[in-house]
Image (tube, coloured by chain):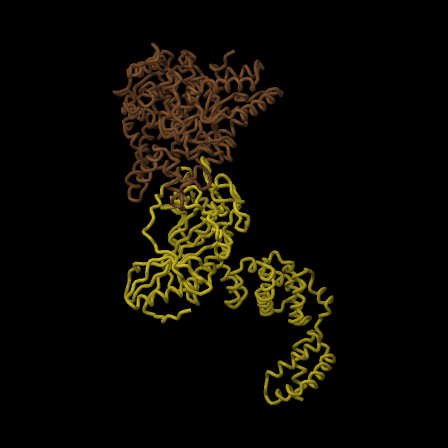
């Protein structure tokens, strides 16, 4: 039997019906990882023993009377930014190459309480700095639709592993597009939560005021279940919201008749691939056919998003990376002869060039005298962007747009089209700055602008749905309804 | 110690930075224990204290409450909103590479403290008080090629109090620091133990030349001061040192000095380099703190009695000398104990229907103060105990004072009784009986003793008769000794004088 294309919801039924055990399912995915990840390079660490132990415990739970939690016995992978107690956690950086955390991220703790089965840690851009996984110290992951192409990033390891059928779901994180863009490029569904919906505790920090731990899965229905499990106020993270967690999965409704959906005109700009634009507009028509009221909306401050992000994100990055000093854990240079050299050499050897670039930018921006001119001003503009979204959400219930201006580019190819980076920022950064919830889901295929498609069909295109703060339910409902009527999310690459 | 010529033309300018480790159960941003007495290194740590990847700080509400309380007691303004900022620098004892502190919105600002300096009330400005986390301690084992870091102290809640440069002498500093320490102890905000480092004071000292009105262009910071006495000495030493340089038209260097308590002098530690750029920015992990008017009102309503109020009350109600009042107030627990003894005295006067008038009551209270500050304090200090930990309770303490007042035991016998009470507990009248210390006023027995003493001390008797009054005291002492301390001194006095003059 084949299980790699089944959703969590489907696997849940099989486990509950005892058609197979968690140990069998876990071995199934572990053997796929062993066989296929040589090609995909989506894992930094595979924890076979821990996985089989967890699966055995899950089976014991399943075999005892009572209802099983949604994730019980289901294998999953975690982006290597989530601290996993006793399992190596690297952030895809040499500086943490041998780091084994003494603690679990709150999200990991919650999954463990649900008897989820961690099979390994997935690749990412070093410390999540990037959108291709190419800055990883462990080499780039490959897009399962075309192994010469990037999976996107920074959560590219998670989306590649999912698309390749190596796990039925994976955790992911977003700071500015790092879930939506790779989900789009790998043809899977991804959820970027409202900021503060999911605890950041134990997730290695990138930009603390932006970071949102989330998930990728085959269906939006699965995402709704995962959101229910992962969300909630955490006493260990003061930035989590007090808002109660709705029963997203129970509340799912495929009736979107009368729902007001806005299409921001600033999100469809020149330079975007024609196929991407057409597939997204096809999806908009589909939603309209299903009863949604479509209107164009105006978000003029969108253009400031990437500028604001370019200041706030590196500032927080430069501060958050201060702790990697070689003293208590992580890489300690053997060449250092005094304290200053411990810092200089350990960090010099441990960090990759993108991390160094961001440290330099952030350090500069926070320097006395520049703080007011840059950081403080950027925070004010950020507020304007948030206000603009609030205004728009008075008139519409959700926004739809592409998740990425392009389908997957070749490894090393991002540099050839710098415009992609700029437009991609337009699509994802403003909503990240405003802390809004969003999903990305497959909505068809498009030819890459380099013209070298692996097949006649082309590569996956992603549709993005953005909701107001705490508006996860609306976003999930639109995704769920769309996936009831279409089967783009049921297309899989052959690896 | 070198002696410098002092001068009144030169005007010292002194301000303080004071770090107070707050007496919270857990650390400022983590549930790890806060225990300044912990001896085993790296015991009070967790993944947050050691700055493991992905960990987040959660602000300690009790630390915030105590900070606001101190702010109010120092007559500060507490703004409705305050926030935490990150202060960046690399050092092994700083786990995250930044200290969570407060930059431009401290919890408390613009306050003052009124202090009695040698009978004169002075007002010293408090610039601000802000909350931050402490660092660990680097340890350098002698002769070994490495250093160690102990993170027990890392992350403990610290309140940094910064004063205006309003102080002018070591005397000012002594009075200010004593009053500040009393206030913070009264609030229960910190043990303020300078030896253990739960209170650390760093004066900034400079001196204005005659006629100078602006602040001097340099200042000297003094560290390594672990008592108020040393703070006073260090300041006086620095003032004299700086005046000496200024008199020779020199300019003291802007340096950090260390106080050396063996040589009683300050020693240069390091030159102050240009100001570091700490790249402060608001900590995105911590939402701003909100002090609602209701919250602050509630704090004010539950503010304990502060030293100034207690001082006033002790003077008015008990008519005690200033020195006694100060000494009692400086030891919060002793002052509380003393008040319990006073209330026992009052009860006893009431119950016994023993209205001997206000004067008798005040006499007993004065004795209570004497015994509290004398014998009791000495025994407590010997055993490193606080009054509430002692075996002698206020009721028995008061009863012993009555026995003295009623002439049932002598003061010297009382000392023996008190020692037993302190060590074993128990009621004083039982102890008096057990030790056979009842005071005798039996004139026959006393006369026998007097005759014996006169017989044995002819020279003293002659001296007295020649007008030497102090020989009388000697003879009283000898008589008391003969009576094994049990004689009523008043009776001895009377009878001895009569006998000698006859």
Which is nearer the eye, B361 or A230?
A230
Q: Residue at the spot x=49%, y=22% of the render?
A: A76
- Could you tell me which quadrant the C terminus of chain B lies in? bottom right
Residue A334, x across and y down, in percent: 42, 40
When asked about the image quadrant of residue A126, the answer is top left
Q: Residue at the spot x=54%, y=14% of the render?
A: A14
Residue A86, x across and y down, in percent: 52, 32
Q: Residue at the spot x=27%, y=21% of the render?
A: A269
Q: Is residue B328 left or right of residue A455?
A: right
User: Chain A rendered in what hue?
Assistant: brown
Is residue A415 shown to the viewer in this render? yes
In the image, is residue B165 above or below residue A465?
below
Which is nearer the eye, B88 or B399?
B88
Residue B107, x across and y down, in percent: 41, 47
When asked about the image quadrant of residue A139, the answer is top left
Which is nearer the eye, A61 or B388?
A61
Is residue B84 shown to the viewer in this render? no
Residue B148, x across and y down, in percent: 48, 47
User: Chain B rendered in what hue?
Assistant: yellow
Which is nearer the eye, A466 or A427?
A427
- Could you tell me which quadrant the N terminus of chain B lies in? bottom left
């Amino acid at each position: 039997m084949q299980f790699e294309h089944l959703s969590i919801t489907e696997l849940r039924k099989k486990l509950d019906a005892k058609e197979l055990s968690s140990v069998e399912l876990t071995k199934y995915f572990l053997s796929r990882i062993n066989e296929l990840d040589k090609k995909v390079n989506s894992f930094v660490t595979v924890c076979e023993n821990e996985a089989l132990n967890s699966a055995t415990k899950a089976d014991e739970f399943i075999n005892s009377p009572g209802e099983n939690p949604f994730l019980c016995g289901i294998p999953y992978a975690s982006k290597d930014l989530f601290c996993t107690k006793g399992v190596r956690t690297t952030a895809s950086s040499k500086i943490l190459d041998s780091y084994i955390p003494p603690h679990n991220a709150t999200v990991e703790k919650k999954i463990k309480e649900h008897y989820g089965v961690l099979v390994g840690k997935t690749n990412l851009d070093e410390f999540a700095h990037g959108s291709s996984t190419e800055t990883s110290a462990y080499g780039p992951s490959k897009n399962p639709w075309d192994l010469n192409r990037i999976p996107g990033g920074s959560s590219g390891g998670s989306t590649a592993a999912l698309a390749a059928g190596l796990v039925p779901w994976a955790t992911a994180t977003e700071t500015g597009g790092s879930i939506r863009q790779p989900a789009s490029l790998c043809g899977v569904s991804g959820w970027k939560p409202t900021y503060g919906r999911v605890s950041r505790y134990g997730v290695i920090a990138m930009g603390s005021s932006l970071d949102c731990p989330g998930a990728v899965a085959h269906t939006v229905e699965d995402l709704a279940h995962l959101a229910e499990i992962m969300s909630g106020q955490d006493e260990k993270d003061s930035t989590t919201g007090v808002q109660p967690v709705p029963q997203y999965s129970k509340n799912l409704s495929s009736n979107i008749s009368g729902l007001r959906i806005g299409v921001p005109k600033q999100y469809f700009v020149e330079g975007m691939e024609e196929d991407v634009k057409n597939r997204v507009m096809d999806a908009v028509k589909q939603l309209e056919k299903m009863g949604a009221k479509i209107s164009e909306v105006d978000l003029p401050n969108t253009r400031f998003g990437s500028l604001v992000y370019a200041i706030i994100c590196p500032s927080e990055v430069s501060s958050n990376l201060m702790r990697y000093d070689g003293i208590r854990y992580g890489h300690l240079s053997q060449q250092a002869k005094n304290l200053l050299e411990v810092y200089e050499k350990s960090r010099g050897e441990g960090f990759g060039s993108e991390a160094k670039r961001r440290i330099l930018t952030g350090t500069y921006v926070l320097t006395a005298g520049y703080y007011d001119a840059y950081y403080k001003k950027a925070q004010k503009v950020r507020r304007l962007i948030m206000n603009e979204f609030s205004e728009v959400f008075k008139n519409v219930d959700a926004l739809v747009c592409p998740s990425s201006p392009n389908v997957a580019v070749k490894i090393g190819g991002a540099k050839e089209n710098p415009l992609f980076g700029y437009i991609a920022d337009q699509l994802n950064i403003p909503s990240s700055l405003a802390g809004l919830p969003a999903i990305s889901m497959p909505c068809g295929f498009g030819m890459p602008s380099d013209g070298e498609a692996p097949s006649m069909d082309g590569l996956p295109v992603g549709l993005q749905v953005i909701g107001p703060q705490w508006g996860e339910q609306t976003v999930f409902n639109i995704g769920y309804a769309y996936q009831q009527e279409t089967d783009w999310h049921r297309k899989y690459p052959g690896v | 110690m070198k002696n410098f010529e002092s001068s009144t033309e030169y005007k010292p300018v002194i301000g303080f930075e004071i770090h107070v480790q707050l007496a919270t159960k857990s650390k400022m941003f983590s549930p790890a224990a806060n225990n300044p007495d912990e001896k085993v290194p790296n015991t009070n740590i967790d993944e947050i204290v050691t700055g493991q990847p992905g960990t987040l700080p959660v602000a300690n509400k009790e630390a915030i409450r105590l900070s606001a309380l101190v702010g109010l007691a120092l007559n500060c303004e507490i703004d409705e909103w305050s926030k935490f900022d990150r202060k960046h620098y690399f050092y092994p004892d700083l786990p995250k590479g930044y200290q969570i502190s407060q930059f431009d919105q401290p919890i408390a600002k613009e306050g003052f403290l009124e202090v009695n300096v040698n009978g004169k009330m002075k007002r010293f400005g408090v610039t601000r008080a802000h909350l931050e986390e402490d660092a660990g301690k680097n340890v350098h084992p002698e002769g070994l090629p490495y250093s160690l870091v102990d993170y027990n102290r890392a992350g403990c809640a610290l309140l940094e109090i910064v004063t205006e440069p309003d102080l002018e002498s070591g005397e000012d500093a002594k009075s200010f620091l004593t009053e500040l320490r009393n206030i913070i102890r009264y609030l229960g905000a910190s043990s303020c133990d300078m030896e253990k480092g739960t209170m650390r004071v760093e004066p900034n000292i400079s001196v204005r030349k005659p006629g100078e009105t602006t602040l001097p262009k340099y200042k000297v910071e003094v560290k390594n001061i672990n008592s108020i006495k040393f703070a006073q000495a260090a300041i006086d030493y620095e003032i004299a040192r700086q005046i000496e340089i200024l008199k020779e038209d020199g300019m003291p260097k802007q340096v950090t000095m260390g106080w050396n308590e063996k040589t009683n002098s300050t020693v240069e530690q390091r030159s102050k380099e240009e100001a570091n750029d700490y790249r402060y920015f608001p900590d995105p992990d911590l939402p701003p703190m909100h002090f609602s008017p209701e919250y602050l009102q509630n704090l004010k309503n539950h503010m304990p009695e502060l030293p100034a109020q207690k001082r006033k009350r002790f003077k008015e109600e008990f008519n005690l000398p200033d020195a006694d009042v100060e000494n009692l107030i400086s030891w919060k627990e002793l002052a509380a104990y003393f008040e319990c003894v006073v209330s026992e005295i009052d009860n006893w006067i009431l119950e016994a229907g023993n209205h001997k008038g206000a004067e008798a009551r005040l006499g007993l209270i004065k004795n209570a103060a004497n015994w509290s500050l004398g014998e009791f304090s000495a025994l407590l200090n010997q055993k490193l105990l606080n009054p509430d930990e002692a075996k002698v309770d206020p009721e028995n303490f008061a009863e012993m004072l009555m026995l003295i007042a009623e002439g049932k035991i002598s003061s010297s016998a009382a000392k023996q009784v008190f020692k037993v009470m302190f060590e074993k507990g128990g009621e004083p009248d039982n102890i008096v009986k057990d030790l056979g210390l009842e005071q005798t006023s039996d004139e026959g027995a006393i006369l026998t003793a007097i005759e014996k003493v006169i017989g044995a001390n002819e020279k003293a008797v002659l001296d007295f008769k020649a007008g030497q009054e102090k020989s009388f005291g000697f003879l009283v002492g000898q008589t008391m000794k003969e009576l094994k301390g049990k004689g009523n001194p008043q009776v001895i006095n009377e009878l001895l004088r009569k006998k000698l003059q006859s």
